[in-house]
Image (tube, rainbow, N blue to C red):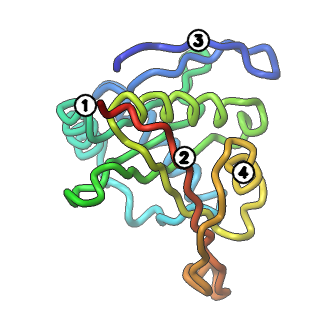
Amino acid sequence: MSRNVVLKCKNTSLVTIRPAEEDDAAGVLKLMHELCAENPNILVTKDELPLTEGEERKIIARIECSHTNWLFIIAMVNSEIAGFLDLRRSRLERCAHTAELGLGIAKPYRGLGIGKAMINYSLDWAGKNSISKVKLGVIASNTGAHSLYERLGFAECGRHRKEVKIDGAFEDLILMEKELISYDS
């Protein structure tokens, strides 16, 4: 599925949601670094990100070749990447009907409906690719994200107590999932 979706977000900006391309690598990497620097509710640290634009380009190229197992989309506002979403099918055969979701939205674009639109795009893609369950982990103090996922039908299915350590303090990781209608024949 390589369709673009254009929508008007709450602040009246036009947003284009589309699959990431290799030429987006610099912008994606920049946003990832910004999110890690300003938002402790992200599981990865800046030291765990790809180090160079070239490395990010290779990751995006690998995703483009794996069109039914891995979705990586971006939200564009004007020429700026406002967010990204990563949805990966499990590599385990017995769990291949499941996928893990990760989402990052730049601070100025939070609360405008971009995350919701990206998740809905990814759920549509998942259903069309025989994924019947999408799961994610959200840090307990990230109440905005938790509430968004609940509004979109994700349910808490577990909790890893003291799973994440941020600035010396432990946080729970809430596990959430959403079952989809299976499109298998």
Mark 3 or 4, nearer chain start: 3
Residue 48 on image: x %, y %: 38, 64
Q: Amino acid at mark 4?
A: Glu
Q: CA distance from mark 3 to mark 1?
A: 21 Å
Nearest the camera: 124 or 50?
124
Residue ID for mark 1:
67
Residue 36 on image: x %, y %: 55, 58
Mark 2 or 3, nearer chain start: 3
Residue ID for mark 2:
103
**Identity of the residue furthest to the right in this view:** 11
Quick check: 156 above or below 127? below
Residue 115 on image: x %, y %: 64, 36
Describe the element under mark 1 as helix, strand or loop: loop
Q: CA distance from mark 2 to mark 3?
A: 18 Å
Q: Amino acid at mark 2?
A: Leu
Residue ID for mark 4:
150
State the mark number for residue 6.
3
Describe the element under mark 2 as helix, strand or loop: strand
Mark 4 or 2, nearer chain start: 2
User: Which label lies toward us, 1 or 2?
Assistant: 1
Mark 1 or 2, nearer chain start: 1
**Identity of the residue furthest to the front in this view:** 185
Quarter of the image where one finds residue 6 = top right
Instruction: Give the class, few, some or many, for how many residues have Cα within 10 Å of label 2's Cα (few <14, many ≥20).
Output: some
